[in-house]
Amino acid sequence: MKEKCIFILICWCLIVSSMVEGQQVVSGRITDATDGTPIPNATIILANSTIGTSSDIDGNYSITYHGIGSFEIGVSHVSYQPMFHKIDMPKPMHQIHFSMEIKELEEVVVVANNNYRRSDVNFFWRRLLGVRPSRNGMEVINPEKVYFFRNSENVLHASCQEPINIINHDLGYRISYILKSFQHDYRKNETIFIGMTNFEELVPENNRQQSAWEKKRQDVYEISIIRFMRALYQDKIHENGFLLIEKDSAWISTTPFPLTEILQVNQDHVTADIETPLYLACLTHPVTDRMIQSTWQIIFGDRSNFPIMILMPQKITVYADGTYTGNLYIQEYRNSVIGLSFILPIEYDTKYSSSYTTELKK
């Protein structure tokens, strides 16, 4: 039985400065939920970006998103439980206050955590990172801060009282990941995890390392969810190397799925209403008529090894800058590109991405 992995991706926010001019400012105050006193030095981040700030001595903060779509912000502090707020309705100014709860004692988290195994720990990191952790690839700085529990129903849970710190040596980023929740049901073979990522660019040792990072970032972007969302809004998924597939009941043939059946175009956004699971093939070149005529062989043939995911039934709203409201539910199928090793910050420049090879190998 093929293992299923359902990921909930929190508000992938794309910023395309050449396409969109605009910004949204979020400001407010961060206080203690018990006595209402201000909390200084709390960290406020914009999800999946390099953008962040801190609250001042009076607990006040202000953070700016340079786009007109949906996004999410997170607030964390060493003494308090992290908090999150999703902004689904874009507008120039938002005022959002956070009232933070004191952190629970770590002893409460680890009570009866004797059921998990080393294989559970390895499974967690593989799912979260998308690859095995290593000192030369995805290096986890504080793995000991993650706590595990496997309950009587054979469900693995993971939690962390502070951000998980990771260095992506392949792409040149330092990652801070706030884990909201993680669970894997071994009986159903399903994994669901929710979290928020913040990036910091590493300083390259030389031009050669910088070039290597940029090349790998481009490779990741080619087949990324970020790029798919932009292509979905523009109704140009084939031109950007993506193919939606609907299998028939007999699993004998496949046909490309027309976007007109799921997309509703509005003045400033499109709505994608997916009623049945759709296979999403992530290619590195545009989809040609020849490929469409031979979808089964090209997509599922013996030589095919590009990533394929399954978009689960859901309804999302995609804005002009590529951001979307709600959570994106995806099931892993083959060569997943879901995991922190495949994520780029929302400010990533994509000017290079217009060149492709359209010829198919015979």
Image (spheres, rainbow, N blue to C red):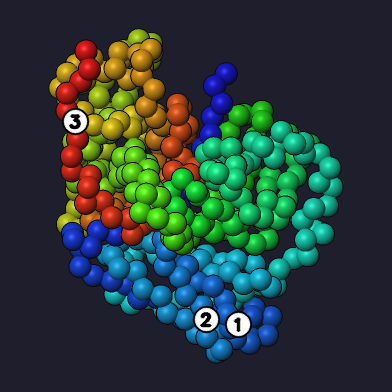
Residues 316 and 156: in front is 156
**Residue receiving disc 1:** 39
Q: Quadrant of residue 20?
A: bottom left
Q: Residue at x 84, y 42 (%)?
A: 114
Q: Which residue is mark 3?
A: 357
- 304 sits to left or right of 109: left
**Helix, strand, or loop for circle 2?**
loop
Seen at 66% across and 71% down, the residue is 78
Which numbered disc, 2 or 3, marks the residue closer to the eye?
A: 3
Amino acid type shown at disc 2: Ser
Q: In front here: 188 or 170?
A: 170
Disc number for residue 211: none
Q: Split into 4 quadrants, where in the image is the N terminus?
A: top right
Distance from disc 2 to disc 3, alpha carbons, whole Å, reads: 48 Å
Identify residue type, mark 3: Thr
> Which of pointers 2 and 3 lies earlier in the amino acid sequence?
2
Residue positioned most to the bottom? 58
- Alpha-carbon span between mark 1 and mark 2: 7 Å
Residue 251 can be seen, yes or no:
yes
Query: Which x, y percent locates residue 313?
Result: 40, 37
Residue holding disc 2: 55
Q: Nearer the viewer, mark 1 or mark 3?
A: 3
Task: Give percent across and percent down for residue 176.
Answer: 54, 59
